[in-house]
Image (cartoon, rainbow, N blue to C red):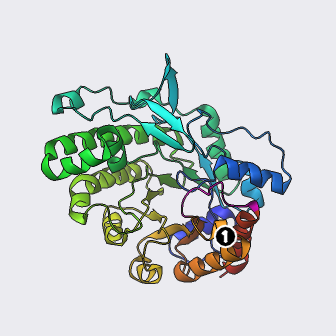
Amino acid sequence: MNSRERVLRTLKHEVPDRVPLALGGSAYNINDIAYKNLIRYLGLSDDWKPFRNDGFKTSNYLDERVLSVLNIDFRYIYMPTPDLVKKDGGIFRNGWGQTIEKSGEFLHTSATLADATIKDIENYAWPNADDYKISPDVIEKAKQYKEAGYAVVARSVCSYGFMEQSEHLRGSEQFLVDMMIDESIAKCIVDHVGNTILNLTKVYLENVKDFIDIYELPGDDYGSQAGPLISVDLFNKYFKPWYKKIVELVKGMSPNVYVLAHSDGFITPFIPEFIDAGIDIIHPLQPNTGMDNTAIKKEYGKYVTFLGAVDIQSALPSGVEATKKEVKTRIKELGDGGGYIVAPANHIGPDVKPEAIVAMYKTAMEYGKY
């Protein structure tokens, strides 16, 4: 059984030979510092080119040598996105029109629509999908990955989804207030963000739909570690319609492609809504949020595949033994009958030693056999 066969069987909720392994997605890659430490540990040369290099992102490598050593079943492709930062005179600006400042590992983006009216929003210079062309080299790479027997994933067209990008443009607090008391403003922003993502998706799929197996949606965090950030009613009112539209577009253009949604935090109330919207894969079931993975698997496991769940906040930074225990726990909770893919709950951080990364995937290879 090759990697693609293993993954497709898992996504169909059938039992493969072992649990598939993932690393390199839009929200589950490896921080550059951790990557450099890992390649030194593995004895690999430091000459692999980053897939992007604008100086403002912190997880910029998709090193196929590392993916091979760790037995990763997926390969990832990437198109230019509005998140990429360019220097405009003396100012750094992204494709959404926001100015960017970097402080350590954190980015500060300007809320360019903070005081905007409906007219201002309608007249705003929203990203034009025609400006973000996928290169022929990436298209050829997707074709080669599929022919080589890997499951091919199209990384998301931008980092932030319908809610978070709206928050970034309006300001988080103001946008949350808008959803409650100024619905026309909130809806106008969300709809423009949604249309931008929709149009970028069209451009993407027109080029790679015949070669990919999974399409990743931009991430939105509807929960925190303490509980949901918004109500299910607000989710259904503002954001669920856009999930449905994107899923319908993807399935219409390529019926065999699976759609992945990312949401950190406590998201148990949102899982049935994602399923109803047509989402096939949910990342990450974030640990340390109080969610009951066993109960979630029992109730929803026949309808959706879970990817991730491996704790990057405490288990991986604690070392090899804690990592082994964590991986075994997640496979036990989520792996029964297929429908689970081992991956980190978010990007592996600079505080994780390479030994723990290797242990994570080695343990999954050994313990994840069916």
Q: Is residue 349 left or right of residue 169?
A: right
Quadrant assignment for the C terminus: bottom right
Q: Residue at x 71, y 77 (%)?
A: 321
Q: Return the x and y of residue 161 as percentages of the image width and height.
A: 38, 48
Q: Which residue is outermost to the top?
A: 89
Residue at label 1?
318
Q: Residue at x 33, y 38 (%)?
A: 169
User: Was residue 351 drawn as part of the magenta stretch in this picture?
Assistant: yes
Q: Is residue 299 above or below residue 190?
A: below
Asked whether 339 or 38 is in front, the reply is 38
Asked whether 281 or 173 is in front, the reply is 173
Quadrant assignment for the N terminus: bottom right
Name the amino acid type tagged 1.
Answer: Ser
User: Was residue 130 drawn as part of the magenta stretch in this picture?
Assistant: no
Asked whether 240 or 87 is in front, the reply is 87
Q: Return the x and y of residue 8 as percentages of the image width and height.
A: 56, 66
Q: Residue at x 55, y 37 (%)?
A: 56
Q: Is residue 267 above or below residue 127?
A: below
Indicate the quadrant where residue 296 lies.
bottom left
Residue stretch in magenta: 345-354
Q: Which residue is outermost to the right?
A: 43
Indicate the quadrant where residue 279 lies.
bottom left
Q: Is residue 62 visible?
A: no
Q: Is residue 329 above or below residue 312?
A: below
Is the magenta region chiefly helix, strand or loop? loop
Q: Residue at x 36, y 43 (%)?
A: 165
Q: Return the x and y of residue 71 as percentages of the image width and height.
A: 73, 63
Q: Return the x and y of residue 286 as percentages of the image width and height.
A: 48, 67
Q: Residues within 10 Å of mark 1 (few under 14, many from 20)?
A: some
